[in-house]
Image (cartoon, helix red, strand yellow):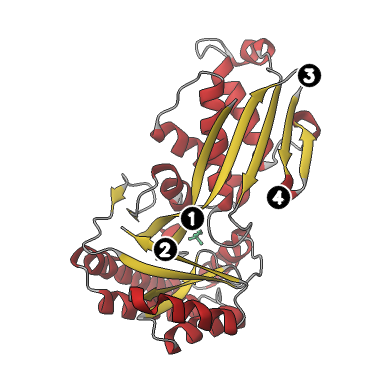
Amino acid sequence: MTASSAPGKIILFGEHAVVYERPALAAPVTQVHADVEVADSDRPGIWINAPDIDLHAELNSLPSDHPIASVIHNFLFLSRVPRSQPLSQREKGIRFPNLEIKIASTIPVASGLGSGAAVTVALLRALSSHLDHPMTDEEVNAFAYEIEKLHHGTPSGIDNTVVTYVKPVYFVKGQPIETLQVGKPFTIVIGDTGLPAPTKDSVGDVRKLWEADKEKWEGVFDKVGEIAKKAREAIESGEWKVLGELMDQNHALLQEMTVSSPELDRLVSAARNAGALGAKLSGGGRGGNMIALVEPEKAEAVASALISAGAKRTLTTTVT
Ligand code: MEV
């Protein structure tokens, strides 16, 4: 049996604008994770058990574009067949092993915490180690990016990158990964609206806005990109107060992009009123999670204010 795990993530700055090549910052959240176990099996086939999403099925009974099925199909295809063979022969030559795959996750689905990317990365690593086909981090990341496209058509690649490397990153689509140097660790309280909101929908809606008035939205994305650059400096120099103000500014621009919601706005205000240095939605928006930057001694007060304002749960994490 082989096991592998991958963390959740939060976007600190720059969601949505990052799809349009503006910089964004994100960090792993290791308190929540996807865990995958792969074991040899006596029964024929590849059996997938993912109780969190009520999935108990043999691989071939799933549609081929199902994100979990497509990770497995593509992995087997790439790993089992000599790369030198022409494609048609490769297909004939594939022999599927008999496997039992267990997938469990503490990352809520469609919450902006990167559950899809975490399942993909953990699954890939468990398969690659169980079937003795080593993959570098770069290969895992590139593979996971292709799968992200099935989750939501035009991903920037930030989710799979943070989840693969488990480091805070300064990310620009299509450019080499830059790790964030955190000058002074900072504390983030995450508040969950409990409302699932697929990233695909909000990303698609922002695209419609952009298509209808490119000049206007390019201007908004530029402002977000500037905020992300300033935030990087504030993180590197440990200026929390500035960082908090930048979060507030970023949230206002996300509201303009129509990706906030009354529930998210309520949690953001509650966090600020309870003493957070700044707060914003995190990830795709509409539902899912928001984040608040807090001085460590205020974390508990902010978390309980979030619960009183309707958060289904909170999580406190330190970005280092
Ligand atoms: C999702 O975590 C972040 C978005 O910017 C989408 C993406 O970057 O692919 C909303």
Residue carrying label 4: 52
Residue that mark 1 sits on:
31
Report the Cα–Cα distance between label 4 and label 2: 23 Å
Q: Earlier in the sequence, mark 2 or mark 1?
A: 1
Tag 3 residue = 44
Q: Are marks 2 and 1 in contact (CB under 8 Å)?
A: yes
* Front-lying residue, 319 or 213: 319
> In the image, is 125 to the left or to the right of 220?
right
User: In which quadrant will I find the N terminus?
Assistant: top right
In the picture, measured across the screen, residue 285 lies left or right of residue 14, that is right
Mark 1: which amino acid?
A: Gln
| Residue 19 at least partly seen | yes
Q: Name the outermost residue toward the bottom.
A: 273
Q: Which mark is residue 46?
A: none
Which residue is drawn at the image coordinates 46% and 80% (left, top)? 302
The Cα–Cα distance between marks 2 and 1, rounded to whole angstroms, is: 8 Å
Q: CA distance from mark 1 to mark 4?
A: 17 Å
Nearest to the eye among marks 3 and 1: give it.
1
Q: Could you tell me residue 191's position as x and y percent?
A: 53, 72
Residue contact between numbered discs 4 and 2, judged by CB atoms under 8 Å: no
- Tell me which label, 3 or 4, sits earlier in the chain: 3
Q: Which amino acid type is shown beneath numbered disc 4?
A: Asp
Residue shown at 64%/65% (left/top)? Answer: 197
Q: In the structure shown, which secondary structural element does the residue marked by tag 3 occupy?
A: loop
- Numbered badge on residue 317: 2
Q: Secondary structure at mark 4?
A: helix
The amino acid beneath tag 2 is Thr
Q: Nearer the viewer, mark 2 or mark 3?
A: 2
The residues tagged by marks 3 and 4 sit, at their Cα atoms, a distance apart of 24 Å
- Dot 2 surroundings within 10 Å: few (below 14), some, or many (20 or more)? some
- Label 4 packing within 10 angstroms: few (<14), some (14-19), many (20+): few
